[in-house]
Amino acid sequence: MYALLLAIIYIAFISLGLPDALLGAGWPAMHGELDVPVAFAGIVSMIIAAGTIVSSLASERLTRRLGASVVTAVSVGMTAVALLGFSFSSAFWMLCLWAIPYGLGAGAVDAALNNYVALHYAARHMNWLHSFWGVGASISPFIMGTALSMGAGWSSAYLTVGIIQVALVIALVVAIPLWGKVDRARPVPVDENGEAEERPGGHVPLATALRIPGVVLILATFFAYCALESTAMLWASTYLVSARGVDTATAATFAAMYLLGVTGGRFLAGFVADRIGDRQLIRGGFTLVGIGALLLLLPLPTPVLALAGLVIAGLGSAPIYPAIIHSTPANFGKNNSQAIIGIQMAAAYLGTTLMPPAFGAVAGWVGLWLFPVALLLFAGLGLAMSERMNRLIPAWSDAPVRC
């Protein structure tokens, strides 16, 4: 039962990544067909981001009331409907309309699944699951590219991914009873005195969660990491071409290598995560990103070290997100973890949404040479905040179940 449920969760993480790169991959064709400016992609992404923030903050209450299984099935169902809606959209306002259920579904399922895995599975699975998210995010551009090259149009790519999501929804609905069976079959956790731990209590209000020592620090850490990741994904290729003189084809390849480094790094981190521990993974990850950023910054006549630095930054980024999520129950208590992970997701989406365009605005004024400096600043902020939190919470007395 445990293995079957874990397999379903792995598939669900692929589904989380599948739609994420579709808009960026298809927008060069979409904006022309819809007769809107290129910049209008930002409107759609902002609507999606707003929905994810709202549903992330509401996820704790929803999950306590409905359970992780139902929230996951309903949320993936909402994204499936939204993707099918995208495929039938013939005007820009229709994309904006369907972006609402897209964002609301994505935020809730992200928070619910991450908390469930943090509570019930070992650190290696958290890393491997987020690696599977990268698999989904890497597949969708190929689906879009194939659809466009065959002349089927961008809408057929959305239709394909929507149908895949519908199939997953069916599997998740069928599997809902399995979640209950697995939870009932789990041994009752005991405290350090050998007595059964109390079941999680009621709803944890936002204001209460924010007052828990260390929560604001981990939110700043998460914001910094997601700002770093999204800025690297959006601006790496442009930096290599404009500031380092790399040809566009090579720059595009190595920009993709950053995401592949994140995906592959999470897979590799899974083999050592349980031995190293979440805190060491976060510390080492930010440090490795800093090394990669320094290599990008070196003013050498050859771009080889800069290209290597981008790959190293991707590998360093890999374990940070999963480790922050997985350590949440241990740092702040199992009863608080769902609420805090929901807030973490909101902080993540804020960093992802706000910082890449903010960097673009500053770089347009100062210059794109600022790109590795921005990565260094984000990595330094994330490392400083996480280390300060570690000093506040020195003991991990509420360790999650190791499955």
Image: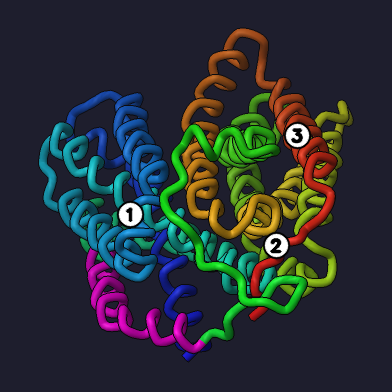
Q: Amino acid at mark 2?
A: Asp
Q: Secondary structure at mark 1?
A: helix
Residue 183: in magenta span = yes
Res. 346 visible in picture: yes
Picture residue at 47% right of the left edge, 91% below the top: 1
The numbered mark at residue 163 is none
Q: In the rendered structure, which disc, 2 or 3, sits on the residue that comes first in sequence?
A: 3
- In this image, 141 relative to 380: left or right? left
Q: Label 1 crowding class (10 Å Cα cut-off): few <14, some 14-19, many 20+?
A: some
For the residues labelled 3 and 1, the Cα–Cα distance comes to 30 Å
Q: Secondary structure at mark 2?
A: loop
Q: Amino acid at mark 3?
A: Met
Location of the C terminus (image quadrant): bottom right
On the image, the x and y values in percent for residue 228 come to 65, 36
Picture residue at 30% right of the left edge, 67% below the top: 70
Q: Which residue is mark 3?
A: 385
The numbered mark at residue 62 is 1
Residue nearest the observer in this picture, 86 or 319:
319
Colouring: rainbow
